[in-house]
Every structure is written in structure tokens, then in C-alpha cells.
Amino acid sequence: MKKFQILFFAAFFSIMATSCEMFDEVDEMFEESGDRKIGSDQLPANILEYISTNHPKATVLYAEIDPDYTAYYEVELSNGLELYFDQDGNFLGLDDDDEEEESYKENGNGNVPQALVDKALAIFNGTVVYNDTYTENGVQLAEVTIQNEEGARVEFYFVQSIGEIYEIEAEKGPFNYEIEANADWIALSKAIELGCAAANSFNCNISEWELYNKSTRAFYEIDFANGAEVTVNAVNGDIISVEFDD
């Protein structure tokens, strides 16, 4: 853990030393990613209340925020625990800092709450072929993979404590289906249409796609048959980036 922290902070300060350049177009749309330390007095009241109630003898050693992840707040306590909270201050999970490796466990298939399974099935109809829960970086996560009658598979990833999707991924087609994951987001077909136009591709066939729901933004990443990877803002359809394989 100490070795990891040394490497982490070395990388962090290296990034900070070079971050004075002007943001590119993507950075202008979104906040610059990366952790930022804050004082304990800057933590939301509900986080401080949670700590005082559940860890009354511990003090806050440090706190930081990362706007790019669901675990928006990370708080290290004097008792060796690292606590994780979302942007609204809801508790997500914890890590024991005394452990040599990052906390991770698999509880086996079939442990995902039925409400989350139903949520995935409402978005993509088919048969559940994989269903598992696990802990990563102190956050309780769930994965549900669904396969339709044509053999296409879509993987759904949830934050269990808040029941929210943080990622949807599909690498196995055919991709002749629709995905409408959120009423505030554009549908998959629209994202493919916009991405295909941005890539100047006459062939809009895709090889895989992902939909990321981060704390500050939601976006599609779509890989086209012509080697283009297009990132599309899932809220307004703006093209964030277009990259081609070398």
C-alpha cells in the first residue's frame, strides 16, 4: 500500500507540474480530471455526521475528491480505514488500509439484487448469462450480462448502494438493437449516427461500444469498422473526440 501511495503521489505531482497549459476542447467541456485534496472542514455535513456516528474515536487524516469517479470523496481516518462517498455524501464502502492489497472479493454468481437485474432487462431484453457482485476500491459493485436471441451480449455495471449504472459495454454483436439507458441521454442509435458522420465513414458498422456514466458527465465510446473511435456526449450529442487506429 505504501509503495502504491508513493507511486500515486509521484504521478500526481508530476501531472500538477505540467497542468498549466491551456485545456483542449474536451477539458473546456469538463473539469480537469484527477484527485484534489481538501480540508476536513470542506466535507459535506452528512459525511462528517457519518464519521462521528460510525467511527467516533477516529479523526480525519486527509480527504480528497475525484470528480471523474462515482467515489467522489475519499476520506482516510486515523484508525486505518479509507471511506468512500458519492458526490451527495452517500456512503459507498471502505478499504482497510492495513491490508497489503486492494480490497477485492467475488461473492459468486447470482448475488445481484433483483431490482438491478430488472433494470438491466428493461434496457436490453434477453437472458441473464452472468450475475455477480464484488468490491473494488471500497465500493460495492454489481455486473449483469444479458444475451438476446441473436447472440448479442450487453454488460451492465452498477454501484449497488445507489442502484445506478456507471457503465454499459458491448463487444459481441450483432448490434442491431436499441439502447435507451436514461431519459436524459440520447439513444445508442443516435450516438452511432452522430459518430459515423464525425468519422466520415460510409460504413457505420461498429465493432463495440461503451456508455460511461461518471459523476460529472455521461458519454459513449464507439468503435467503427473503419478504425475510428468516436466519443459522443450522451446528453447533448456533441462530438468529444475522434481517433483513428495507427
Image: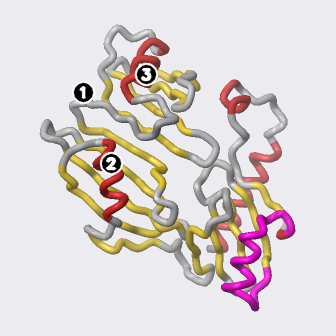
Overall secondary structure of the magenta stretch? helix
Is 110 placed left or right of 100 in the picture?
A: left
- Which residue appears farthest toward the bottom when viewing the image? 57
Disc 1 marks which residue? 176
Q: What stretch is highlighted in magenta?
A: 41-59
Disc 3 marks which residue? 228
What amino acid does circle 3 point to?
Ala
Asked if residue 165 is positioned above or below residue 244 in the image, the reply reads below
Residue drawn at point x = 36 percent, y = 50 percent: 156
Coloring applied to the structure = secondary structure
Q: Distance between the residues labelled 3 and 1?
A: 19 Å
Q: Which of marks 3 and 1 is in front?
A: 1
The secondary structure type at the circle numbered 3 is: strand
Mark 3 vs mark 2: which is more N-terminal? 2
Is 246 placed left or right of 32 in the picture?
A: left
| Residue 155: mark | 2
